């Protein structure tokens, strides 16, 4: 089969590789129809992770089941399925409490597994023609009849829509709240979409890219253009000097100031400043336990110079971590089916799988207009 | 009246000062019977805050109502009352949601007011013979008949018992959890007591003072003696290598390593290490937005070099801030009345108000056996 | 002043009565600008309560503060305020937990007080030119500048919008849920509006009046016309045979079947049938502890023949009771200000206060097109 | 193998039957060591259900794994396991939210499956030498090393301890609450034990059997002897006339008044009376959708004459349904291991499996001293 393979920093290729196949009786095999490039794939692409050469990438996957292991009961050959990026066993201490992003069994010795990702277990990604799906009865979201018509919406349930939603949950957002979201990348935009669906009274999205800010406005948010570094002032003014009721970090450890230098503690300290006392902060942008390529000693050790004194005095709360996709994907699917959620609005490019390398390159460059790339495998 | 007055670093005296009195129709005047010295008073005592000279200290107060403003309806002259350290109006946006530690009206321009404390408004403290209590119908916890017999238990409802309890709430502790608590000072001990009351399966308390650790054991906890800096190893061993289900920070910005040097990020980074993935961390030890007396540049700015990458990867959560005492004091009072909570167990010294200076000095020295000092005003 | 006075069954008049005035230092006096007739006023109007003759009615009130008691601190003369129908002290055991609908002090011996209502304390209503507002700092929702332009939206915060919202909270509605609402009266319609704001995937509203069902559709809901008694079948079909995720009772003890006979247990048993196993049911329609005018022995005693066995087997939950308006009105006000909530959409008639009797009569008759009546006092 | 077989009303026998065996790759086979007779078994025993003749009874089961299907990954041969009475797939819409008592797959067409129980699917019970456990990786609670020493405690995790705990959760019990529990049978006693563990300030248990009330006292509760029908008065007196903060129904549809006549609505209406306004009521006693053997027309239809008007006016909430055992068993197991929970305290009789019929008979007679019977299979 064809698959997107990591060769080294800023080097991915579409190669012929051995077909994915059923390995355990609880697996299914999925013929991929749509698979996305995620912003977090760029951490690997840029050489800022320890991912091994030869890894098949891709954790935002959707397709049709073409074979099922003999212990699979619920999922049937022919089902259209969307796969959460987290691979979860369904029966460990964390999974049984719904913490599927922190499965203790799928990636032994760690909490959390995923397809095609650094440090997330021995699983191949889905930027390929075929994907092996472990613990299939637990992991597959079986889509309703006619799902093909909204394929580009449903595929967003694999990661970025639930991840954006998770940000608002970690931030403890309530109906009627004002919300400030740092980052208008795909996840930040999905956080904005989620906040609107959940009844926010005001959604502010901070970024420096005009194309992304335009999408934020299309989703009903107020765009906060930080090209001049004035985001804190803008937010305080919009909130009457009180700060937002809650906030979301959707950028991660490679965040940059308005002069485009990496300043890893920038978004977190700005959140402490621009969220009101007692407000919640949800962090879904990725921060790494160590970052040998970081700019200074703290960064290399995975530390931030964090305004903890201010954070404590304001009595704020932080929730972090990868989204437990299964906690949200079923309910969000109902909203897509009902036409009340439209996550595909952010897609800028549909490319055939063969052009994946081009997609990676332009998305990594934050090239004007390249906001979200989906890859289509041929029929 | 007599009152404990702050004169400067490590200098408090008991002086004659003008009597406290009713100033607004919603005030009551309380004759203090018991008032405690709090660990957070020591931040002022040591000159590590901006508290003004002449301030009457004391925010852990209990007594009898001797006069009531003409708008007071619920509280009656003669009532025995325990006063939450936070002064709250009862009707602002935060108070109406129960966030009485972050009242927006009692200390205009700030979120949160208190008796006798730096930056917490113009209110005198209760280490005195008389105390003015604003918004009395809202703030007074009226105690049941016969409360005098458990005076030393009930006075703990003013601060440290609810604050310790708050730590376990911020940590999202569940019945059956293992809990690690950093700090066996009065607040840490109250967190341990609270965790036991709430059904923890294992409570571990970390400290270096043997007298305090002995009290932790008396409260049913496992003492983790960190005199040799091995606390992380001890906790991981006790939890089968997984870390505790949740943890509490009850030390604050002046925390020290086992060589007794201040290392402000020590307890927080140890919490990240010793709490399991997805676990909660509750922070009630005080961290200051700025600390001119801090040991390095980060500390002076109120920043910590925080292991944010590890924190994110583990998907942990942090809750912070001063306790909303009223959220807990009524229920905890019922437990005291029923004999199911005994916070007075930690009291080491009862002194007359006149000996307050001595109490401050020895408590500040962490002198062996001086775990908690309560001051008694003569009748 | 002029006021709407209850004279007896189906007999209300607008009379001259003594002016309302400040009685306690914590009161304010409000000049009413808008005051609504509520569906629950009709229980009194129809003689199905024990309300005393001479009572001034009206608990959905809004206006401007013209005088304040000397203990009032937050609310100022000139403020535009909307008054929650529940009168709450702000400092009793229930109020401090946010249960302002069950205040233990405002109506001694009972849990809960209100303006102008049977059994809810000695308070006059606001269908009048002036209204005395007790515990004003706690009870007044001060509206933002320019609120006059959305007067008809904001007045709904006094009762029916928060009450409808409360129904969805009691029903434990989650984002993405399907919701079935029994009753398309003003409260049912506000429940539908709330469910949509909170991210329901499908809202179904059951009624027999076509004008009300048309409003439900205007609010984005699916109208379930029960004129032929087929509502259960319709709901089960729309939900794939599973039942709705949750449901709301917005009719109360005078509910009728499709032949217009009172069948008090009809909506509750239909809810048990049409809500899925484990689903929540929120009850805000009024049920009375006794109903001497009821149709049978059970009804007279305030009992229902309730399908408890089915309810238990399905593992459902019921939440009941009058809305704690203050728990919601501040957040809902933000949504009105932001143009994201439009509760005034249901108003059918604006009448001068002088025509209140006519308003009562037609609203009570469920006359075609009389869905919600607001009364305006002259300037 | 030997097994307890239902032959008809008040007729069970221990017969030789074909061995239980692995049927699907996700099954394990368990050699039973301990299996209890449950109060809910008596509904079948008394002929008050539709259970079929020949059914092997028993849903409170514990033992050792002796064989595992080839898709089982987590559970190993030799593991000591306790089996939740609910059989759950782990991957349906309800299971993934933790609602394992309402699995949609294990008992198709119904929500919820169990071992050896009427209407709960085609599964044999565990009052036998061997038990087939479906979806074993999900359903088995693997016990820690040395569990044999606390066998009689751990076996209670199969049903009654989590069920009693569930009652307190459904009742929304908070730390410091007073709780009233109707029924001092095994489930009621476990609710009392749970309430104490969770920090109740006062636990009251209502019953008419002195041996059971004595056990309640042993668990720290106040015994309310209802032999004279005065329980409501006693509870109101103990709670200062306010009613308990919350309450639990642990009796079910066969509840009797103090003259020992069945009065199905008695406990529920007493709960409404004796729980305070806004209080929660948790119902785990079984109520049946129909009861052909019921005493009157309402009972036959599974209806209660429920004081709904009073319930609504008080703003109470009811939660019902079978316990989702997996939601609690892991945490409760930690408390047993730590010696902080001792559910075996209620066991009155240990019998060999061969004497099961005698156990059923005496337990059904509520014979003095027969509070809980556990059956032991020979080695």
Image: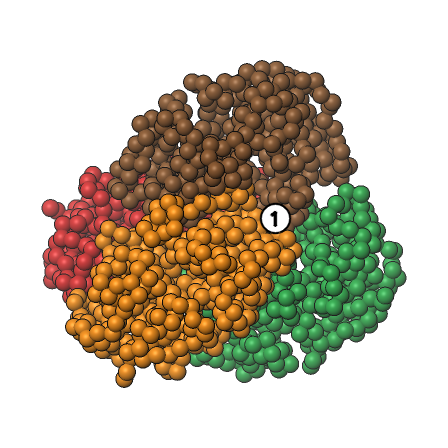
Chain colours: A orange, B brown, C green, D red
Q: Would residue C242 be found to the left or right of residue B58 on screen?
A: left
Between A99 and A124, the one lying in front of the other is: A124
The quarter of the rendered structure image containing the N terminus of chain B is top right
Q: Dividing the image into 4 quarters, which one contains the C terminus of chain B?
A: top right
Instruction: Give the x, y percent position of residue C165.
Output: 58, 63
Q: Secondary structure at mark 1?
A: loop
Question: Toward the viewer: D203 or B55?
Answer: B55
**Residue C243 visible in rendering:** no
Residue at left offset 35%, top offset 70%: A361
Instruction: Answer few, some or many: residues within 10 Å of disc 1's Cα (few below 14, many 20 plus, some between 14 and 19).
Output: many
For disc 1, the chain is: B
Which residue is nearer to you in this view: A315 or D32?
A315
Q: Position of residue B356 (x, y in %)?
A: 58, 18
Residue shown at 44% from the left, 79% from the top: C237
Q: Nearer the viewer, residue A329 or C358?
A: A329
Please indicate, yes or no, whether residue B69 appears anywhere in the rendered image.
yes
Seen at 19% across and 42% down, the residue is: D145
* Residue C358 vertical placement versus B9 (above, below): below
Lateral position of residue B277 relative to residue A171, left or right = left
Q: Is residue B235 above or below residue C40?
A: above
Q: How many marks?
A: 1
Relative placement, left or right, of C328 versus D250 is right
Image coords of residue D9 (percent x, y)? 27, 60
Residue topped by disc 1: B94
Q: Position of residue B323 (x, y in %)?
A: 53, 40
Measured along the vertical axis of the image, is residue A81 above or below residue D2? below
Location of residue D43 by image quarter? bottom left
Residue at 40% x, 37% y: name it. Answer: B267
């Amino acid at each position: 089969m064809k698959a997107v393979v990591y060769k080294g920093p800023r080097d991915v290729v579409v190669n012929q590789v051995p077909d994915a196949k059923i390995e355990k009786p609880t697996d299914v095999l999925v013929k991929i129809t749509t698979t996305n490039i995620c912003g977090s794939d760029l951490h690997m692409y840029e050489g800022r992770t320890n991912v091994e050469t030869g890894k098949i990438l891709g954790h935002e996957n959707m397709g049709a089941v073409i074979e099922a292991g003999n212990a699979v009961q619920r999922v049937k050959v022919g089902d259209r399925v969307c796969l959460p990026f987290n691979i979860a066993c369904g029966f460990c201490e964390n999974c049984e409490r719904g913490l599927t992003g922190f499965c203790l069994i799928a990636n032994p010795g760690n909490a959390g597994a995923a397809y095609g990702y650094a440090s997330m277990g021995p699983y191949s990604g889905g930027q390929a023609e075929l994907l092996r799906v472990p613990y299939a009865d637990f992991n597959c979201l079986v889509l309703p009849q006619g799902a093909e018509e909204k394929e580009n919406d449903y595929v967003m349930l694999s990661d970025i829509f639930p991840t954006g939603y998770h940000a608002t949950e970690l931030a403890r957002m309530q109906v009627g709240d004002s919300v400030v979201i740092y980052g208008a990348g795909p996840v930040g935009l999905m956080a904005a979409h989620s906040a609107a669906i959940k009844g926010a009274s005001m959604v502010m999205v901070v970024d420096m890219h005009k194309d992304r800010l335009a999408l934020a406005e299309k989703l009903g948010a107020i765009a906060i253009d930080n090209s001049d570094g004035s985001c804190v002032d803008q937010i305080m003014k919009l909130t009457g000097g009180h700060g937002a009721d809650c906030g979301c970090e959707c950028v991660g450890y490679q965040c940059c100031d308005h002069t485009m230098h990496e300043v890893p503690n920038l978004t977190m300290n700005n959140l402490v400043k621009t969220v009101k006392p007692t407000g919640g902060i949800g962090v879904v942008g990725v921060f790494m336990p160590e970052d040998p390529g970081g700019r200074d000693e703290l960064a290399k050790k995975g530390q931030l110079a964090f305004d903890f004194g201010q954070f404590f005095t304001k009595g704020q709360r932080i929730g972090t971590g990868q989204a437990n996709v299964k906690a949200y994907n079923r309910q969000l699917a109902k909203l897509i089916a009902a036409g009340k959620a439209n996550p595909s609005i952010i897609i800028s490019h549909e490319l055939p799988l063969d052009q994946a390398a081009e997609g990676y390159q332009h998305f990594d460059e934050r090239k004007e207009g390249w906001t979200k790339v989906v890859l289509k495998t041929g029929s």
